[in-house]
């Protein structure tokens, strides 16, 4: 996982509530293989970015030239609700985004982002509205997110603290993969498993037929 | 005496292996279900890292999302879309390479994972079950803690370690008390709840459903309720085990037998929430006040009793909500203040992990018996066992006589990943769980409702009140 520490980048405002993971990664793209960092970027919000003939919708915010290099998206309510498809987090990454800032997120999606190195953080709705306004008035303006300090600095210089679980913050800042941490607990897993199996011998097991 | 605890807290604490001072815990996974939807991403990575399955017998791979519901006899050769065929084949290969038990397209038990896990007795009270699917909470109706996980990184983690890192959710009890009125089903209950709390309203919570209406409900109904927990934002939905649960489980293939059954039952009876246990939040609903529901918008919270009107955005004060409703009506091609029952439809779909169990098919068939559907549509039973049962009861004939297609089981038109899509601009009355833009296909217009209401819509060719139909 690529570590996340301090990011200063162009931010795009996406004023559109309840964008579900099926809009972030339309189902027809889920059949694709993926090399990390590639392949899913094209699919990201495809039906919002392109019309039925595949032409860019010029009125859609991410198609404005000023946002071409955006690495931060300031989202709307319930961004990433719906389906658990982890590919939605990969689409965000492959499109080139490193951080999502919004009033609320779908929980499965948010966890998928954090575990894959994309920072997805909640900021109060009133602040989000103010960020949108600043970004609309000055397209291409930058936002700074300092994860170690848990501080977001808006284009106008105002700083906003944000919350994140200490565990996710630590793993993001150090770029640690969950599985490596888990395997350091191998013995604890082993003994837990033996005890559980003895206490609940009826727990189901299946066979390959 | 230990402090009173909730059902959720009892199961959660029984599965904690490592408590992290940083606020997430490592939990043991008793059983994991795997569907083909992007699980290839996990297996690609596991292969690359040369990792193996820690406990192959505690997994069941189930082919459900990409499997067409026609031409099954031809196997993968009957799948004309090569990309779809490839996804189905990949799960065959991945299950084989990683030693995983697999219910594939050819299998006697084939069905939707969340239909067959309860049906086979895999989901049992007190278990922690995971699946790379957001509707995993369905299994919570059996008294299990059933948690959705991502199909890439998280699935890879569960396969390699048989554990999952989770932040402990807060607890929310939703009580539904009283008697449900005529034609008001589990689907109407859960849609009413989602309409009241919103799609993000239960985010961060584990929901326990209780109250006399839940107690009186069949397992099929409870499965429908828990299924849509995620549509209110909750990853976990659960119902305390009771006699209905035990009677449902007894003699199922993977359920405990003999002395194990007695021991299991004694343990299960310790699980329900203690009388004085506290929840972080409580909500209650009056069952008698509920009505048959339909959605009008592009989010499951956009729902209304069927005798209502399409909302008028100009009368909505909250600016964000108004923006959403304006966009939703534009996408759904609906005019404000139109009576919902004047909205004509182009097709119907009965199926999905929400409403494809035998009781759902019986209710829909009861409405359709002796009637003709005014629009085309299809019925996809939730599992091969449900299909066999329905055929034994003659339900397939009723659907066919009404003009609807009787299909094989799978996720099918709920999200169309198997290629069975609603055409752009086509309006579909559907028993499924999501009506987000493009869910059933690009430009598809989805209205979700109960099986009885879809059957009524099929007969009338428009959104319709099943209560009026049954009086005719």
Image: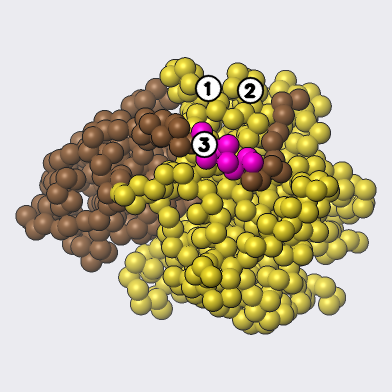
Chain colours: A brown, B yellow
Dots 2, 1 in contact, CB < 8 A: yes
Residue B446: tell me if it is visible: no
Tell which of B190 and B250 is nearer to you.
B250
Q: Are marks 3 and 1 in contact (CB under 8 Å)?
A: no
Q: Is residue B73 visible?
A: yes
Magenta stretch: helix, strand or loop mostly: helix
Between B456 and B280, the one nearer to me in the picture: B280
Q: Is residue B28 above or below residue B267?
A: above
Q: How many marks?
A: 3
* Residue under numbered circle 2: B99
Residue at mark 3: chain: A
Q: The residue marked by circle 2 belongs to what chain?
A: B
**Which one is nearer the viewer's eye here, A207 or B79?**
A207
Residue identified by numbered label 3:
A191
Q: CA distance from mark 2 to mark 1?
A: 9 Å
Q: Separation of disc 2 and disc 3 at Cα?
A: 23 Å
Return the mark for residue B323.
none
Residue, x 32% and y 70% (percent of image)?
B319
Q: Which residue does the numbered mark 1 point to in the structure image?
A: B52
Q: Position of residue B346 (x, y in %)?
A: 67, 54
Q: Residue at x 23, y 35 (%)?
A: A174
**Which of labels 2 and 3 is toward the front?**
3
Tell me the crowding category of disc 3: few under 14, some 14 to 19, or many 20 or more residues within 10 angstroms, Cα based. Answer: few
> Bounds of the magenta span?
A190-198
B256 left or right, relative to B36: right
Q: Residue A191 in magenta?
A: yes
**Residue B133 falls in which quadrant of the image?**
top right
Mark 2 or mark 1: which comes first in sequence?
1
| Residue at image location 74% in from the left, 57% down from the top | B265
> At which x and y percent is residue B315?
41, 78
Quadrant position of the C terminus of chain B in the picture = bottom right
């Amino acid at each position: 996982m690529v570590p996340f520490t301090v990011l200063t980048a162009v931010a795009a405002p996406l004023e559109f509530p309840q964008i579900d993971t099926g809009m972030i990664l339309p189902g027809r793209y889920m059949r694709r293989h993926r090399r990390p960092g590639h392949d899913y970027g094209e699919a990201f919000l495809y039906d919002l970015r392109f019309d039925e003939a595949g032409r860019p919708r010029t009125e859609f915010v991410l198609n404005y030239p000023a946002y071409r290099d955006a690495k931060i998206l300031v989202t709307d309510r319930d961004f990433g609700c719906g389906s658990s498809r982890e590919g939605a987090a990969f689409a965000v990454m492959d499109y080139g985004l490193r951080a999502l800032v919004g009033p609320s997120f779908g929980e499965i999606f948010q966890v998928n982002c954090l575990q894959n190195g994309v920072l997805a953080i909640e900021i109060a709705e009133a602040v989000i509205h103010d960020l949108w306004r600043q970004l609309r008035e000055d397209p291409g303006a930058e936002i700074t997110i300092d994860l170690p300090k848990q501080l977001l600095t808006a284009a106008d210089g105002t700083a906003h603290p944000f919350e994140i679980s200490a565990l996710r913050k630590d793993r993001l800042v150090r770029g640690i993969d969950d599985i490596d941490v888990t395997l350091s607990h191998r013995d604890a897993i082993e003994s837990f498993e033996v005890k559980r199996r003895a206490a609940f011998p009826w727990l189901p097991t299946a066979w390959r037929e | 005496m230990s402090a009173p605890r909730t059902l959720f807290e009892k199961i959660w604490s029984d599965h904690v292996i490592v408590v992290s001072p940083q606020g997430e815990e490592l939990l043991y996974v008793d059983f994991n279900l795997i569907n083909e939807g992007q699980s290839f991403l996990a297996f690609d990575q596991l292969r690359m890292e040369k990792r193996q399955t820690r406990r192959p017998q505690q997994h069941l791979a189930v082919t459900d999302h990409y499997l067409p519901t026609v031409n099954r006899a031809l196997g993968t050769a009957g799948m004309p879309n090569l990309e779809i065929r490839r996804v189905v084949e990949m799960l065959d290969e991945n299950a084989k390479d990683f030693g995983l038990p697999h219910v594939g397209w050819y299998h006697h038990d084939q069905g939707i994972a969340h239909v067959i896990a309860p049906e086979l007795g895999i989901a049992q009270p007190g278990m922690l079950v995971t699946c790379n699917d957001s509707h995993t909470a369905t299994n919570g109706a059996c008294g299990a803690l059933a948690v959705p996980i991502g199909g890439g990184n998280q699935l890879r983690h569960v396969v390699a370690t048989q554990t999952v890192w989770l932040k402990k959710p807060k607890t929310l009890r939703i009580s539904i008390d009283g008697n449900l009125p005529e034609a008001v089903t589990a689907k109407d209950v859960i849609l009413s709840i989602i309409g009241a709390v919103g799609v993000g309203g239960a985010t961060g919570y584990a929901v326990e459903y209780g109250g006399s209406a839940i107690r009186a409900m069949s397992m099929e109904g409870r499965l429908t309720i828990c299924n849509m927990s995620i549509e209110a934002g909750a990853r976990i939905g659960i119902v305390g085990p009771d006699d209905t649960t035990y009677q449902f489980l007894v003699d199922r293939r993977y359920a405990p037998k003999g002395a194990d059954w007695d021991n299991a039952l004694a343990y299960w009876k310790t699980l329900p929430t203690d009388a004085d246990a506290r929840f972080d939040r409580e909500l209650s609903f009056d069952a008698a006040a509920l009505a048959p529901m339909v959605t009008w918008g592009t989010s499951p919270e956009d729902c209304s009793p069927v005798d209502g009107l399409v909302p008028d955005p100009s009368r909505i004060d909250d600016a964000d909500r108004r923006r959403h409703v304006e966009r939703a009506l534009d996408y759904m091609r609906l005019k404000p203040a139109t009576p919902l029952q004047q909205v004509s439809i182009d097709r119907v779909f009965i199926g999905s992990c929400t409403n494809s169990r035998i009781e759902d098919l019986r209710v829909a068939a009861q409405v359709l018996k002796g009637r003709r559907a005014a629009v085309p549509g299809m019925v996809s039973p939730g599992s091969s066992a449900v299909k066999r049962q329905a055929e034994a009861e003659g339900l397939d004939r009723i659907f066919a006589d009404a003009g609807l297609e009787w299909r094989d089981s799978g996720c099918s038109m709920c999200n169309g990943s198997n290629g069975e899509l609603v055409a752009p601009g086509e309006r579909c009355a559907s028993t499924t769980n999501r009506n987000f833009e493009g869910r059933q296909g690009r430009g598809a217009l989805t209205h979700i409702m109960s099986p009885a209401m879809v059957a009524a819509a099929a007969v009338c060719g428009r959104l319709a009140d099943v209560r009026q139909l049954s009086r005719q």
